[in-house]
Image: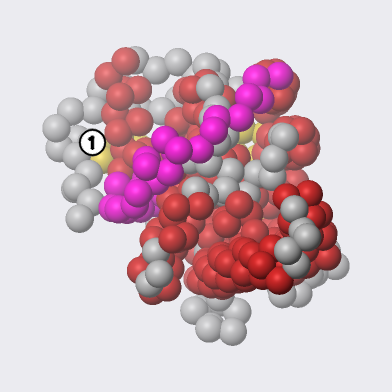
C-alpha cells in the first residue's frame, strides 16, 4: 500500500486515498475497496467523507496480517480507529451492570464451532484481502460461515451472555464489523447528500433496530410482563396445590406431584410456548438473565436496567459482536436494499462506478467528550 503516513509526528497529517467500487443505483452496493496513492488517484466525487472507513479498512488489513506497518504507525492507526469508532465511543460512555450478569451466567462450550469459524475466517481473509485491496464480494461469503456458527450453538444467540470468543476470533470479527458499518454509514451519507436531505428519501442507520429487528423498549416491556405473569402463576399454583392438600385429606405427596405436573402441562407450558412464539426477543432476554434480577417490584427501575443490559449485550459482549457482524455481512452479501432499506425503489440498470475519496489522517485527534 502506497500510503504516506509512515512518519506522523505531533501536529502532522497523513493522507489516505481509496476507491469504493460497486453497482450504483438508489444506493451504491459496494463490491471492492482499493487503496491508492493520493497523488495517483483519479478525481472522483471526493465528498470529504471516508476517514472512518479508510482507517477501519487499514485496521482490518493489519489485523489480518496482509498489510505490514511500522510499530509506531500501527499504534497510531489503531488509536485513531478507536477514536473514530462510534461503537467504541458508546461503550466508553455506557454505564451498566453487565459484569455482574456475566459473572452469574454459565459459559457455554463451543470450541469446535469456534474452530470451524476460525478456519473459515482465515480462508475468506486469504481470498478477500491484499495489501492494498479488500474484495467485499469475497468478504461477504463469511456471512454463511457466521450463520453456520450461530446455527450450531447449543442455545439461541440473542441475549446469550454465556458466549465467549477467543481473542483472535473476536478481533477478526470486530475488524470486519467496524469496516462494514463505517462503509455503510459513509455510503448512506453520500445518498443523503445526493437527495439533498429530503426527509422522505434520507436513509437512517439504527444498529439496535437492525440487529434486533425490534425496538428495545418493546422487548423490555415484554420480558417484564412475562416475568410478572410467571410470578403470579407460580404463586397461584402453590395456592391451588395447598388447597388440594387441605380439602382432600386423603391426598398424599404423589397426588400433589401429579396435580403439579398437570398444571404445568396444561397451563404453564402452553403459556411459555405462546410467549416464545409471539415475543421471541423478550423470551430470549428473560430466559438469559438471572431470576433474581426480575425480583425488583418497581417496573420503571427494572425497565431501565433491562434497557441498559440490552444495549450492553449488543455492544459489549461476544454474542452481540457475532450478531452485529452477521447483520453487516448480510448487507454485503444480499445488498443494502434487501438487508437494511427495502423501501428504496430499485433501478433496472446498475452501472459499475468507482467513487474516489481522499482524507487526511490527523495524528492528534481531539478527545471525544
In the rendered image, residue 27, in percent from the top left (x then y), is placed at 66, 63
Q: Residue drawn at (53%, 83%), measured in percent from left and top?
A: 199
Residue 301 placed where, x, y %? Answer: 35, 69
Q: Residues within 10 Å of mark 1 (few under 14, many from 20)?
A: many
Q: Which quadrant of the figure has residue 144?
A: top right
Q: Which is more toward the observer, 137 or 349?
A: 137
Q: Is residue 337 above or below residue 344?
A: above
Residue 287 seen in this snapshot = yes
Q: Is residue 174 above or below residue 186?
A: above
In the rendered image, the vertical position of residue 233 relative to residue 152, given as above or below: below
Q: On the picture, is 106 further left or further right than 300?
A: right
Nearer to us in this view, 215 or 277: 277
Q: Residue at x 49, y 79 (%)?
A: 197
Residue 364 lies in quadrant: top left
Residue located at (39% from left, 46% from top): 98
What residue span does the magenta drawing correspond to? 84-112
Q: Is residue 96 above or below residue 361?
A: below
Whether residue 89 appears in magenta in the rendering, the answer is yes
Horizontal side of residue 326 vs 316, given as left or right: right
**Residue 182 drawn in magenta:** no
Please tell me which residue lies in front, 357 or 274: 274
Q: Residue furthest front?
A: 249
Query: How far across and down, in percent of the image, does residue 246 sit?
Result: 66, 67
Look at the numbered disc 1 and give the secondary structure of its residue. Answer: loop
Q: Is residue 170 left or right of residue 255?
A: left
Secondary structure mainly formed by the magenta segment: helix
- Residue beneath the point at 47% across and 60% down: 294
Residue named by callout 1: 363
Task: Left or right? Give the position of 99 relative to 120.
Answer: left
Q: Quadrant of the C terminus?
A: bottom left
Q: Is residue 332 visible?
A: no
Amino acid at each position: 500500500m502506497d500510503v504516506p503516513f509512515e512518519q506522523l509526528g505531533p501536529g502532522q497529517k497523513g493522507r489516505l486515498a481509496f476507491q469504493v467500487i460497486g453497482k450504483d443505483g438508489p444506493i451504491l452496493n459496494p463490491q471492492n475497496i482499493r487503496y491508492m496513492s493520493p497523488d495517483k488517484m483519479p478525481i472522483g466525487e471526493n465528498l470529504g467523507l471516508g476517514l472512518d472507513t479508510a482507517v477501519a479498512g487499514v485496521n482490518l488489513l493489519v489485523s489480518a496480517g496482509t498489510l505490514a506497518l511500522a510499530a509506531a504507525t500501527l499504534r497510531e492507526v489503531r488509536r485513531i480507529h478507536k477514536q473514530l469508532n462510534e461503537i467504541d465511543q458508546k461503550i466508553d460512555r455506557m454505564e451498566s451492570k453487565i459484569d455482574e450478569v456475566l459473572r452469574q451466567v454459565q459459559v457455554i462450550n463451543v470450541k469446535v464451532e469456534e474452530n470451524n469459524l476460525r478456519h473459515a475466517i482465515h480462508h475468506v481473509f486469504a481470498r478477500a484481502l491484499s495489501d492494498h485491496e479488500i474484495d467485499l464480494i469475497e468478504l461477504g461469503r463469511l456471512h454463511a460461515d457466521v450463520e453456520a456458527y450461530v446455527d450450531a450453538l447449543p442455545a439461541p444467540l440473542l441475549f446469550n451472555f454465556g458466549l465467549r470468543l477467543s481473542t483472535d476470533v473476536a478481533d477478526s470479527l470486530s475488524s470486519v464489523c467496524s469496516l462494514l458499518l463505517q462503509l455503510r454509514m459513509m455510503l448512506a451519507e453520500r445518498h443523503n447528500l445526493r437527495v439533498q436531505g429530503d426527509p422522505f428519501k434520507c436513509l437512517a442507520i439504527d444498529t439496535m433496530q437492525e440487529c434486533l429487528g425490534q425496538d428495545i423498549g418493546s422487548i423490555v416491556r415484554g420480558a417484564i410482563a412475562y416475568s410478572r405473569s410467571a410470578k403470579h402463576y407460580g404463586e397461584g399454583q402453590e395456592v391451588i396445590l395447598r388447597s388440594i392438600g387441605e380439602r382432600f385429606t386423603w391426598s398424599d405427596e404423589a397426588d400433589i406431584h401429579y396435580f403439579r405436573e398437570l398444571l404445568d402441562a396444561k397451563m404453564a407450558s402452553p403459556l411459555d410456548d405462546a410467549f416464545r412464539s409471539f415475543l421471541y426477543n423478550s423470551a430470549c432476554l428473560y430466559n438469559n438473565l438471572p431470576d433474581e434480577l426480575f425480583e425488583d417490584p418497581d417496573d420503571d427501575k427494572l425497565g431501565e436496567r433491562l434497557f441498559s443490559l440490552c444495549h450492553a449485550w449488543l455492544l459489549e459482549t461476544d454474542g452481540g459482536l457475532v450478531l452485529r457482524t452477521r447483520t453487516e455481512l448480510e448487507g454485503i452479501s444480499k445488498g443494502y436494499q434487501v438487508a437494511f432499506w427495502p423501501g428504496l425503489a430499485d433501478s433496472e440498470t446498475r452501472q459499475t462506478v468507482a467513487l474516489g475519496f481522499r482524507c487526511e489522517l490527523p495524528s492528534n485527534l481531539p478527545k471525544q467528550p
